[in-house]
């Protein structure tokens, strides 16, 4: 398994999966602590109308217009949710439910109404992507990692996802203190002069960027899973934010690698020739990790509730 | 063609599906209200996504038992079982661990859906069984539905609606005021369980029509829309049921009549249009009425301040004030008061002077609390009190 075939067929999808998982899990830590975990769910649903509109406007399936369309849709959705919440005085969960279902429905309808039969654009693709197809055709073995000609043939998703991951890390490192303080005590953060409103919005936007960059490679479902499951599992392991983030990165990477291996090689062990959806398997593994943490995690119960132990 | 569909003349199957959709819409609207009032609207999203592994497993079991795996009842039972497991895990996560409900919702939703996708990819490679159509559960598809399936959907939608109507009283009470419901001896935990049962039933029945990704919209959008029109819990329930029924009926009919219109998204968009109209037009909570209210308040403040300025002989610089005074015929374009305007100004000034006096007097403390610069003092004090106040107004010295 560790040979030239592995480098060509499995290395890049695995690396992309790891980048996606970590890029989503990092902001997910803060979203879970701020009780905004479902923002990721909303964003990944509205990505579909964004790419469909971008396709209808440009007429081609190319990366940049679609990423821009998806990002624009995410911004529109966040704005619309906020508008509905304030104008109609509706609780945030319901406002979110109204907007993202309506936008998703609009996206499906546009897709059905327009002629997209000639191009590879469908709802299933947006939902669970196609991680397995991101192979590195030019690779001849481990040596190719040092070969500039072969490196030029890397799937474009890998550098893009790595760049997104770097951006997310940069945001969290630069904003570490204000983010941490405003997540745990928003009132205190405001007395210290931290502008919590724009900071919260920036966090949502960074999450949206991570989600949009990721969905193209791996689809929506894995994005939602990675926003929530690794941080939630990490939350059950520790009481310190720094440690929690370290755990969540570890869990995310583990889920990506294990999920990919199980999806690609697991069926072979059962004697079946075909692999199963890697995105789905990664989400499943992250859920299993969360389940294990919920049963055995050292900090699984709420502090102060005596009945929870046992 | 659209008219035919709306009047149920497109054939037996389409009619059954349309009626079934309308019944389901009503059940979803009523059931969703309780979720919405308890602020747990998005729990339904987790439930609906959690049906997918059940559909896949039911298909595999049926194929293993020798069928072709397309029995709708079997698939729906599988869906209900896995959604139930998802719901149990969700409540376990949010009750027994420190995770909040939203994280639990997201975790159940994504993991169950991901596992369902894994099962679907396994099914795609299976050689036996007729797997075509399982994707229809994602977004709903009513085109080319078998008569038996249409019957199953119409009947189970009617049963769900009956169940909702049967349970509506305890549910209304528990979702509107859980503490009160507990105090009169109602078991709120059990009521909550019943509510989740209804949501589960709506989700499972709606799988084939609306699809599991969008079914949550049928549970959320009608109650949110209904909430704009009334402040009473029982009215929200009725209105939401009606709105859900209308959206589903119109959506299903449109989808049956026109080509390339998938049922689920159309139903959701019809519901969203009703929501948009309500957001704009509803009296009280709507945007338009809020704007009107704001404008009329602004107008009263400007007129009052303008009149006071006129009475005290001060120039008016604010353009809006001047315009409003002119429109009332109380001032000329150059800011000079008309006769009528002088009379109104004098009255406003008298009112204001009286207010200032009672605000300085502790014995009028309760009345003075009503001061907002707009309320005429006659609405707060009796005629006798006003005469008493007027006695305290210092008489201006007349120059002789």
Image (cartoon, coloured by chain):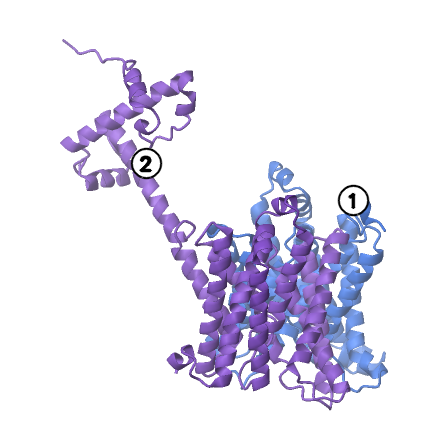
Chain colours: A blue, B purple
Q: Position of residue B116 (x, y in %)?
A: 70, 74
> Taking B16 as reference, is B302 left or right?
left
Q: Nearer the viewer, residue A150 or A230?
A: A230
Q: Which residue is mark 2?
A: B301
Q: Is residue A20 visible?
A: no
Q: Position of residue B384 (x, y in %)?
A: 30, 19
Split into 4 quadrants, where in the image is the C terminus of chain B? top left
B78 to A119, vertically: above or below: above
Split into 4 quadrants, where in the image is the N terminus of chain B? bottom left
Mark 1 crowdedness (10 Å alpha carbons): few <14, some 14-19, many ≥20? few
Q: Position of residue A63 (x, y in %)?
A: 57, 74
Q: Position of residue A257 (x, y in %)?
A: 79, 70
The residue lying at 67 percent from left, 60 percent from top is B105
- Please tell me in which quadrant of the rendered image residue A119 appears: bottom right
Chain to which the residue tagged by mark 1 belongs: A
The residue lying at 18 percent from left, 29 percent from top is B342
Q: Is residue A264 visible?
A: yes
Q: Nearer the viewer, residue B82 or A286?
A: B82
Chain to which the residue tagged by mark 2 belongs: B
Q: Which residue is mark 1?
A: A305
- Please tell me in which quadrant of the rendered image residue B308 appears: top left
Q: Residue furthest top?
A: B400
- Looking at the rendered structure, the number of numbered marks drawn on it comes to 2
B32 to B296, vertically: above or below: below
* Residues at marks 1 and 2 on the same chain: no
CA distance for labels 1 and 2: 53 Å
> Taking B113 as reference, is A3 left or right?
right
Q: Residue furthest bottom?
A: B127
């Amino acid at each position: 398994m560790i040979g030239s075939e592995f480098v060509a067929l499995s290395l890049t999808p695995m690396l992309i999966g790891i980048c996606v998982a970590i890029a989503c899990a990092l902001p997910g830590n803060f979203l879970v602590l701020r009780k905004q975990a479902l923002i990721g769910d909303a964003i990944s649903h509205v990505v579909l109308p964004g790419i469909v509109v971008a396709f209808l406007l440009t007429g081609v399936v190319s990366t940049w217009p679609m990423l821009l369309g998806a990002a624009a849709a995410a911004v529109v959705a966040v704005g619309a949710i906020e508008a509905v919440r304030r104008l109609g005085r509706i609780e945030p969960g319901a406002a979110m439910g109204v907007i993202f279902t309506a936008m998703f429905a609009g996206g499906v309808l546009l897709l059905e109404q327009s002629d997209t039969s000639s191009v590879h654009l469908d709802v299933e693709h947006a939902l669970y992507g196609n991680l397995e197809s991101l192979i590195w055709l030019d690779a001849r073995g481990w040596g190719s990692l040092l070969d500039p000609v072969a490196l030029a043939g890397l799937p474009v998703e890998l550098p893009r996802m790595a760049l997104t991951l770097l951006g997310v890390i940069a945001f969290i490192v630069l904003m570490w203190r204000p983010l941490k303080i405003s997540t745990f005590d928003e009132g205190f953060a405001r007395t210290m002069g931290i502008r919590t409103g724009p900071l919260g919005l920036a966090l949502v936007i960074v999450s949206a960027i991570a989600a949009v960059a990721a969905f193209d490679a791996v689809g929506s479902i894995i994005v939602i899973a990675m926003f929530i499951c690794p941080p939630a599992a990490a939350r059950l392991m520790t009481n310190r934010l720094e440690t929690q983030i370290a755990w969540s990165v570890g869990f995310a990477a583990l889920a990506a690698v294990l999920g990919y291996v199980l999806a690609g090689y697991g069926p072979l062990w059962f004697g079946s020739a075909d692999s199963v959806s890697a995105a789905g398997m990664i989400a499943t593994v992250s859920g299993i990790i969360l389940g294990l943490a919920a049963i055995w995690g050292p900090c699984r119960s709420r502090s102060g509730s005596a009945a929870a132990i046992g | 063609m659209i008219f035919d569909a709306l009047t149920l003349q497109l054939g037996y199957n389409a009619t059954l599906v349309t009626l079934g959709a309308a019944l389901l819409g009503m059940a979803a609207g009523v059931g969703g209200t309780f979720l919405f009032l308890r602020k747990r609207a998005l729990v339904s999203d987790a439930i609906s996504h959690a049906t997918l592994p059940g559909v896949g497993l039911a298909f595999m079991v049926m194929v293993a038992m020798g069928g072709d795996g397309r029995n709708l009842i079997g698939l729906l039972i599988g869906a209900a079982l896995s959604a139930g497991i998802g719901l149990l895990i969700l409540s376990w996560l949010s009750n027994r661990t420190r995770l909040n409900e939203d994280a639990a919702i997201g975790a159940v939703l994504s993991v169950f859906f991901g596992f369902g996708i894994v099962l679907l990819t396994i099914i795609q490679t299976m050689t036996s069984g007729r797997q075509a159509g399982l994707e229809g559960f994602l977004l709903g598809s009513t085109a080319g539905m078998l008569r038996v399936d249409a019957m199953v959907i119409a009947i189970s939608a009617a049963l769900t609606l009956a169940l909702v109507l049967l349970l509506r009283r305890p549910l209304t009470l528990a979702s509107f005021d859980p503490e009160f419901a507990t105090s009169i001896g109602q078991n709120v935990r059990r009521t909550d369980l019943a509510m989740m049962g209804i949501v589960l039933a709506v989700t499972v029945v709606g799988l084939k029509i609306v699809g599991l990704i969008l079914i949550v919209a049928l549970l959320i959008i009608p109650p949110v829309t209904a909430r704009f029109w009334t402040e009473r819990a029982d009215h929200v329930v009725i209105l939401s049921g009606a709105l859900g029924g209308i959206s589903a009926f119109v959506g299903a009919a449109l989808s049956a009549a026109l080509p390339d219109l998938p049922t689920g998204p159309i139903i959701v968009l019809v519901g969203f249009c009703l929501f948009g109209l309500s957001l704009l037009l509803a009296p009280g909570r709507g945007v338009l009425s809020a704007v009107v209210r704001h404008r009329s308040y602004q107008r009263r403040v400007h007129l009052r301040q303008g009149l006071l300025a006129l009475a005290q002989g001060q120039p008016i610089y604010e353009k809006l004030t001047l315009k409003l005074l002119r429109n009332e015929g109380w001032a000329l374009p150059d800011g000079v008061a008309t006769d009528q305007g002088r009379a109104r100004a004098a009255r406003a000034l008298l009112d204001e002077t009286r207010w200032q006096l009672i605000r300085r007097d502790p014995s009028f403390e309760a009345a003075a609390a009503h001061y907002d610069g707009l309320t005429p003092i006659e609405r707060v004090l009796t005629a006798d009190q006003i005469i008493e106040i007027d006695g305290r107004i210092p008489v201006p010295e007349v120059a002789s």
